[in-house]
Amino acid sequence: MFTRVLVANRGEIAVRVIRALHELGVEAVAVYSTADKDARHVRLADQAVHLGPPPAAESYLRIPSMIAAATTTGCQAVHPGYGFLAENPAFVEACADNDLVFVGPPVDVMAAMGDKISAKRAMRAAEVPTVPGTEGATNVSAARAAAEEIGFPILLKATAGGGGKGMRLVRRPDELEDAFGMAAAEAEAAFGNATMYVEKALVPARHVEIQVLCDHHGNVLTLGERECSIQRRHQKLIEESPSAALSPEAREAMEAAAERACRAVGYRNAGTFEFLLGADGSFYFIELNARLQVEHPVTELCTGVDLVREQLLVAAGEELTVTGRAPRRGHAIEIRLNAEDPEHDFRPSPGRIGHFEPPLGPGVRVDTFVESGSIISPFYDSMVAKVIVWDSDRAAAITRAERALRETVVEGVPTTRELALEVLGSEPFRSGEYSTSTLEAMRAVVA
Ligand code: ADP
């Protein structure tokens, strides 16, 4: 095992990774921008290195500063968390050039999976079903031809996409040209790459994803699914496991597909296969997230596997002790508490948290960097905390999630707490019969 590791991130995920390192007896080196100089991850770490001013482009995204932070402190490895440099092949290469172990997949696999067109191609080769659509980059007229062939509605997607950016639903032929222009411009601004492709829009559909762990000895462990269909603007708000939509046979088919794909592409470390599940039970690959995900605690609570610890062990060359399908039990639900304003279409509303009281008690886990007096900075994402609960079955887990949210106090910024309570109490959520369209449909009724 390593003796010292750089945590190349901030916020709750930096705190999460530092905890895993300390439990393994490994020293953690934090990095921070000026905005984060008093942040919890800085205080929890054994050492901390200042990267630069608050804008991410001048701090958490600056590869030379990150590498210097690792090498000058004598780190042997780098854990990227999620976001920032976590899926940046140039960063993975820079780590290798400086003899730093990158806690994640090899650079070629990351690059292939980061481009959604090449990822889909690799999946088809591994006999994993993909959403029908264009097989390569597309211009407006090719998109139109493809749309006529597969039928509306279609989704225009950016090959470099992420976080729902560069994506447009097109319902009718006359909407296509404008939507293409807007999506391509958004993709250019967000990723410096305006390449687009077309997919059939599966509506209604559910977003169900499979967590995997792969070591360097050819072993693969799949850890079941997370149901992430409660979304706003393609952003997840509530995740749960198991999914009410999967029969044991359907679950096994998805896990087997993920395992097959891992072997086919030579995947290593933790990853997530995202699938869309159609109303008829058919499922289609949409993307592979080559990193730890925000919602990973849901899987940790159901399987008892500490995914961050396993990531570090695998990166250090250890062999997985359990392979195949991870045993699991009970039901877990995660609620993302974001600093967002319900009065203004849930736009991010950063600010100072005057008072913060996380929920406590049986079956409750809170992943956060926030404490009373913390600042939710306009420079970074608006997440305040993740409240994750576990109980023996789904009904009990929902009750526990409601209890935990009612105990939670966040003063100073508006949050998604009330919205989450509304969803947890709603008929579609309680029945388990919901899709990626449900939350927006609910809001339309309320508004
Ligand atoms: P990003 O990488 O930007 O997050 P994804 O490809 O993961 O984009 O898709 C995000 C969300 O968009 C999915 O969870 C789903 O709700 C919706 N989505 C993506 N592809 C489709 C599709 N072909 N049909 C319907 N909805 C889709």
Image (cartoon, grey):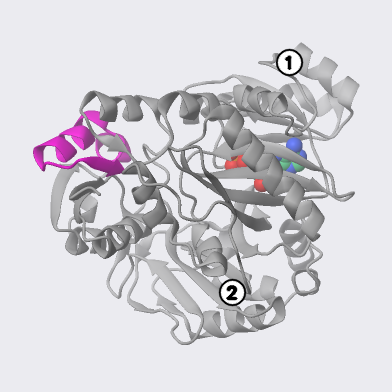
Residue 361 higher or lower than 141, as above or below: below
Task: Tell me the SS state at disc 1.
Answer: helix
Picture coordinates of residue 271 (x, y %)? 52, 44
Left or right of residue 197: residue 15: left
Disc ID at residue 202: none
Say which amino acid is labelled 1. Answer: Val
Say which amino acid is labelled 2. Answer: Glu
Residue 207 higher or lower than 248, as above or below: above
Between marks 2 and 1, how big is the CA–CA gap?
41 Å
Q: In the rendered structure, are the residues bearing label 2 and label 1 in contact, judged by CB atoms less than 8 Å apart? A: no
Picture coordinates of residue 235 (x, y %)? 60, 50
Disc ID at residue 140: 1
Picture coordinates of residue 180 (x, y %)? 69, 24
Count residues near mark 2 (Cα–Cα under 10 Å), then give few for <14, some for 14-19, many for 20+.
some
Task: Tell me the SS state at disc 2.
Answer: helix
Residue at screen point 78% across, 68% down: 432
The residue lying toward the viewer, choosing from 263 and 87, is 263
Left or right of residue 353: residue 49: left
- Residue 223 sits in which quadrant? bottom right
Q: Quadrant of the C terminus?
A: bottom right
The residue lying toward the viewer, choosing from 444 and 120, is 120
Q: Is residue 97 visible?
A: yes
Residue at screen point 87% across, 31% down: 152
The boundaries of the magenta stretch are 56-79
Residue at screen point 74% across, 45% down: 276
Count residues near mark 1 (Cα–Cα under 10 Å), then give few for <14, some for 14-19, many for 20+.
some
The residue pinned by badge 2 equals 418
Q: Earlier in the sequence, mark 2 or mark 1?
A: 1
* Residue 4 sits inside the magenta stretch: no
* Residue 59 sits inside the magenta stretch: yes
Q: Is residue 165 visible?
A: no
Picture coordinates of residue 279 (x, y %)? 87, 51
